[in-house]
Amino acid sequence: MSEKGPLSILVVDDDKNQRSMLAFALSDRGYRVVSVESGALAVESAKKEKFDAAICDIMMPGVNGVAALAQLKKAQPGLKVIMATAYATTALAAASMKGGATGYIAKPYDLKELFAMLDKALAGP
């Protein structure tokens, strides 16, 4: 929690169950959560309101996560973005990190690992 209220997290995933699970787990930890089902909606959201961090799926139809990452960073250069995918490869991880991602996590989520990564990202510069 900051002086301005709870930290705000943008959850981006085309899988409704994944979005719901993350929204519940993050809300339970005191974050304010906005969840959207596409990269395009994520970018729209980032243009309208400020987020402290985002958790973004890579494999989505339309604007995929790597493309969304570039647009999110353009809309909010300081945004901490953790990329996630069930199809973890070294190439995807490299593309994500090169695009400015703060971290990269494989699905299914290990919430303990995700929260540690998120805490570290939010504490850092």
Image: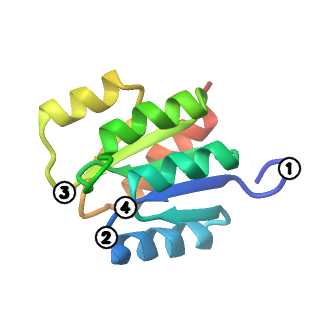
Do the residues bearing badges 2 and 1 touch, measured as CB atoms within 8 Å? no
Residue at the right extreme of this rendering? 3
- Real-space Cα separation, disc 2 to disc 1, in angstroms: 31 Å
> Which mark is drawn over residue 4?
1
Kindly indicate whether the residue at mark 4 contacts the one at mark 1 (C-beta within 8 angstroms): no
Q: Given contact means CB atoms under 8 Å apart, are the residues at marks 2 and 4 in contact?
A: yes
Disc on the earlier residue, 2 or 1? 1
Mark closest to the chain's N terminus, 1 or 4: 1
Which residue: 87% across, 48% down? 3
Q: Residue 35 appears at what percent x and percent y? A: 52, 65
Q: In the image, what residue type sits under mark 4?
A: Asp
Distance from Cα at disc 3 to Cα at disc 1:
34 Å
**In whole angstroms, how far apart are the C-alphas of marks 3 and 4?**
12 Å
Q: Are marks 2 and 3 in contact (CB under 8 Å)?
A: no
Residue type at the position of mark 1: Lys
Element class at badge 4 = loop
Would residue 81 appear left or right of 124 to someone viewing this image? left
User: From mark 2 to mark 4, how far is it between C-alphas?
Assistant: 5 Å
Label 3 sits on what residue type? Ala
Q: Label 3 neighbourhood size at 10 Å, few (<14), some (14-19), many (20+)?
A: few
Q: Which residue is mark 2?
A: 15
Question: According to the image, label 3 marks what residue?
Answer: 86
The mark closer to the camera, 2 or 1, is 2
Specify the quadrant that holds the C terminus.
Answer: top right
Q: Earlier in the sequence, mark 2 or mark 3?
A: 2
